[in-house]
Amino acid sequence: MKFISAVLCGALALASATVRAQNAGPTDPQIAAIVVTANQVDIDAGRLAESRTKSKDVKAFAQLMIADHSGVNKAAVDLVHKLGVTPEDNATSQSLKQGGDANLTNLRTLKGAQFDRAYIDHEVTYHENVLQALDKTLIPDAQNAELKALLVKVRPAFVAHLEHAKALQASLEKSGA
């Protein structure tokens, strides 16, 4: 379980570093694809959790992930349309998609408390890595001021998601769930 989570989250950091090394940083169209893919990965995991969990706290968290990440995706898509930018698939967005698919495959094999722990453990690691990518790659490399502003604007939500996930993780550990 933790391996799948580590693979997915490592993919974000490593692929961002690869894009940076190859191109001196991702382009705005690549950043747009990374943002949309990263949000979609979390929306998909949230939908699975919402349908699988019996925990009201995990379900509420999953619903929050679906709502918040859908909102970020809408804002990102609206912005790229306004700017006339077409998101460009790249190594990072492809790795995120593959990692997200692997996470969903793993989560589908789990039930009950085991599912809840795996989902929340993944959310903690995922949000830590997304914040690292925002801070070290996406925000610094965004060239368009409006794209950069959007990334800066949504960053506090990712911090809040991480803190919420950590609190749930501690609660699940404490309850033995």
Image: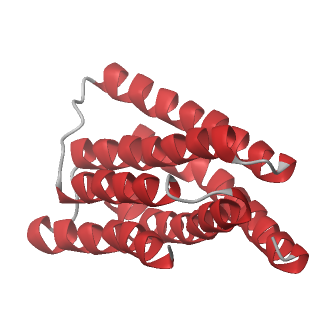
Residue 132 in sight here: yes
Residue 30's place in the image compared with 169, above or below, is: above
Residue 168 at what x, y percent from top left?
80, 65
Kindly indicate the quadrant of the structure image that contains residue 33: top left
Q: In this picture, is 108 found above or below 116?
A: above
At a point 81% along the width and 78% down the height, the residue shown is: 173
Q: Observer-nearest residue: 151 or 126?
A: 126
Task: Identify the image quadrant of the C terminus.
Answer: bottom right
Residue at 67 percent across and 51 percent down: it is: 157
On the picture, is 47 further left or further right than 104?
right
Taking the image as drawn, is residue 143 in sight?
no
- In the visual, does 55 lie left or right of 47? right
Q: Where in the figure is residue 13, as x and y percent of width and height?
A: 35, 72
Q: Residue 101: where, in percent of width, then height?
A: 35, 51
Could you say which is closer to the camera, residue 106 or residue 26? 106
Among all residues in the image, which is located at the extreme right? Answer: 175
- Residue 100 relative to residue 65: left or right: left
Image height of 102 relative to 174, above or below: above
For the point 23% across and 41% down, the residue is 29
Query: At 25% across and 68% down in the image, what residue appears?
Result: 15
